[in-house]
Amino acid sequence: MADPFLPYGRHLIEDDDVAAVGRALRSGTLTGGPAVAAFEHALARATGAPHAVACANGTAALHLAALALDLGPGDAAVVPTLTFLATANALRYVGADVVFADVDADTGLLTPAAFESALARAGRRVKAVFPVHLGGQCVDMEGVGAIARARGLKVVEDACHALGGTCAGQPVGACAHSDMAAFSFHPVKTITMGEGGAVTTRDATLARLLAELRSHGMVRDPARFEIREQGFGSDGEPNPWYYEMPEPGFNYRASDIQCALGESQLAKLGRFAAERRRIVDWYAEALAPLAPVVRPLPRVAWSEPSWHLCVVLIDFRAAGTTRGKVMRALAGKGVGSQVHYLPVHRQPYYRRLYGDLALPGADAYYERTLSLPLYVGLTRADVARVVAALAGALGLKS
């Protein structure tokens, strides 16, 4: 029999996850029920943030964060160009401009120096920064956060890759140096809700805004009703059916079905994170003979990652080949791979909007990056098979 295909990422669903979803399906409440609140409580506990607000997906989480900060036309926010489309797009959804920042050429992370450079280029319109924790490793949030505080800027961590890791000794999502942190629970992430997202924060006012904005902007608190003759009866009691919409929101709710799966998966976060770290360590050992053509991603000192991606940096020119040829050769051996990411400032929409930008760190990272299979359940033999296939594709000895 042929060896099974090894994708670059995969979820792990176990019997207790299936049972949790089954209980939600039989509960009589499929959305807006107790499973949502239970998941939010569990996520707040896991991250150390006082508040967690569940939503439909990671993109919705980023969009809600931008809405909650009241970003809009005339405003701008700094975003590292090495990220998924959603980080920048969330700002365009609210009409704000994106100021693309360069990243470290070896880690792909926004640095304090690159943040400062982007701010200098942008002028005074910047209201926020959205640092991205790439592949599981964290941005230097102490450094970036200090610059943001000095300038009165808001900070939203794009932590969609980083749940289960730590930053400067605190859990990712604790918001020690930010206003909010956005998460994704897509099937290739460390834990999954199928699709789903969340925002954590230490600010009760932001948490309330996020919860309202994910559900059409509806307000049901009688103390906040603006039109008393509509909201209250002649006896002075609030009308039980009544709600108001001070500002429009979106239907970004997460269901009880999703949140039941999410809470079950959260209980395994420590195990999943530890196994991902172990697999990345296996890769580092197995890849050593391929140096200097292939190098594991350098590790930053301030972060213990829960690795979302296993990234290697490859000198394709020195190997006399191209990334496309290598990826096709790997696929032919049953090994999946991916590129994270094409710098977003190169996308046609953003090039038309802002013109061509010179961001050499991001370009250098992009030219060499390749993501190899990483997920819970990958064995040491699987890692050896991946590295052997990569060595063969590059014409190297493993």
Image: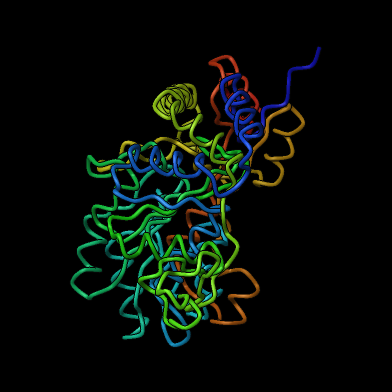
The quadrant of the image that shows the C terminus is: top right
User: Residue 41 location in percent, x, y?
Assistant: 38, 41
Q: Residue furthest front?
A: 235
In the image, what residue occupies the spot 73% across and 34% down? 331
Q: Is residue 185 above or below residue 221?
A: above
**Is 187 displayed left or right of 99 in the figure?**
right
Q: Residue furthest right?
A: 1
In the image, what residue occupies the spot 79% across and 16% down? 2
* Depth order, front residue of 353/15: 15
Coloring applied to the structure: rainbow
The quadrant of the image that shows the N terminus is: top right
In the image, what residue occupies the spot 48% across and 26% down? 283
* Depth order, front residue of 313/2: 2
Task: Tally the numbered discs.
Answer: 0
User: Residue 305 location in percent, x, y?
Assistant: 37, 37
In the image, what residue occupies the spot 30% across and 41% down? 171
User: Residue 32 location in percent, x, y?
Assistant: 55, 49
* Depth order, front residue of 132/24: 24
Q: Is residue 167 above or below residue 351?
A: above
User: Residue 265 location in percent, x, y?
Assistant: 50, 30
**Residue 59 occupies quadrant:** bottom right
* Depth order, front residue of 69/395: 69
